[in-house]
Image (cartoon, rainbow, N blue to C red):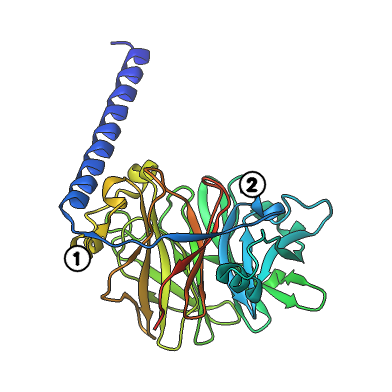
Amino acid sequence: MNKSTLNKFLLILLVQIFYTCSTSQIREITKIKQDANPVKEVKIQQIKLKGKVSNRKSEISGLSWYKDNLILLPQFPNRFSNNKYGEIYYIKKNRIIDFLSGKDTSAIEPMSFSINTNEFSNLFGKGSGFEAVTFHNNTAYFTIESFSFGKTVSYLIAGEVDSIKKRITLKRKSLTLIPNKLNIRNIGDESVLYFNNQIIPIYEANGKNVNPNPKVNLFDENYNIIKTIPFPNIEYRITDVTTVDSNNIFWAINYFYPGETQKLNPAPDELIKRFGIGKSQKKSEYIERLVKFRITKNKIELVNSAPIYIKLPGEEGRNWEGIARLNKKGFLIATDTYPKTILAFVKYKNK
């Protein structure tokens, strides 16, 4: 067998092995779903949008509240900008409540804060960009996912918010690499919390097979790591989180796209085994759910309560990447690109 034939043989063998593993995993996931109890799901109420943000290329990658403004964070703020300043979009809370109550159901066109990312253009290449944001007073804390020498890396960066000029100014000295021993392509710190004067980025892949002992880094307001604390194993991806409430509770989007089976190598889903699965998701390979966490000084843990399953529109799923509470009424969630830009309300009585 010559070298060329040998290489072709090895390539075919590898493809067969990967295909077999992927098919086996999908079958195992499917079996767990079939054996699980079907549970009630929540239907979304879609909020109509217009303007730039309604374009799927806006790639909304996070939601958060700045005062009474819902921030819709685009992965690439300069995508639709004609000048050196990019845009970060926002909608007034009262406008959202008016839409949901039926008082004004016309499409909403978000307003914007300007932001200059030119100094950090090397971090906003293909596939890179903003992934999450949270606020404390007039400071915004962002995570950025970037590709560097074949590796996916994440950064923490802060910005000062000027609510009069509607401008966010990034602080060069705040740019900090978030340590991570894993290297999974296009997987980074997709969420960020502010808790007890600490900034806490959260890595998105925390399944048992890819990240057996997940941890999070706690940064002080000078962007130094104080310590690391444990994060629970949870399958699939964590794509965004709410703020922490007065009971130290926050919620996260927990999403699975079956095309990432090989990448995420999911283990048997303990939440499905324990609490069941949404009726529509029982028939689909997708997972769309909101999961409840508690944070303390020394760890982040799953709360022993059932996830909120979101009713699927069909067999296909939606790439939810943004979440924020809406008072005690429920949650606002948003998609990044697929299948289009969607801002939606999930009704849930937050206690």
- Viewer-nearest residue: 131 or 287: 287
Above or below residue 8? Residue 85 is below
Residue at x-position 58% and y-position 77%: 223
Above or below residue 79? Residue 202 is below
Q: Is residue 132 visible?
A: no
| Residue receiving disc 1 | 274
Query: Crowding at label 1, few (<14), some or many (≥20) Cα neighbours within 10 Å?
Result: few
Q: Which amino acid, mark 2? A: Lys
- Picture coordinates of residue 283, whole percent (x, y): 27, 46
Q: Farthest left residue?
A: 35
| Residue receiving disc 2 | 57
Residue at x-position 19% and y-position 51%: 32
- Picture coordinates of residue 60, whole percent (x, y): 59, 56
Q: Which quadrant of the structure image shows residue 176?
A: bottom right
Q: Total label count?
A: 2
Residue at x-position 54% and y-position 82%: 220
The local secondary structure at tag 1 comes to helix
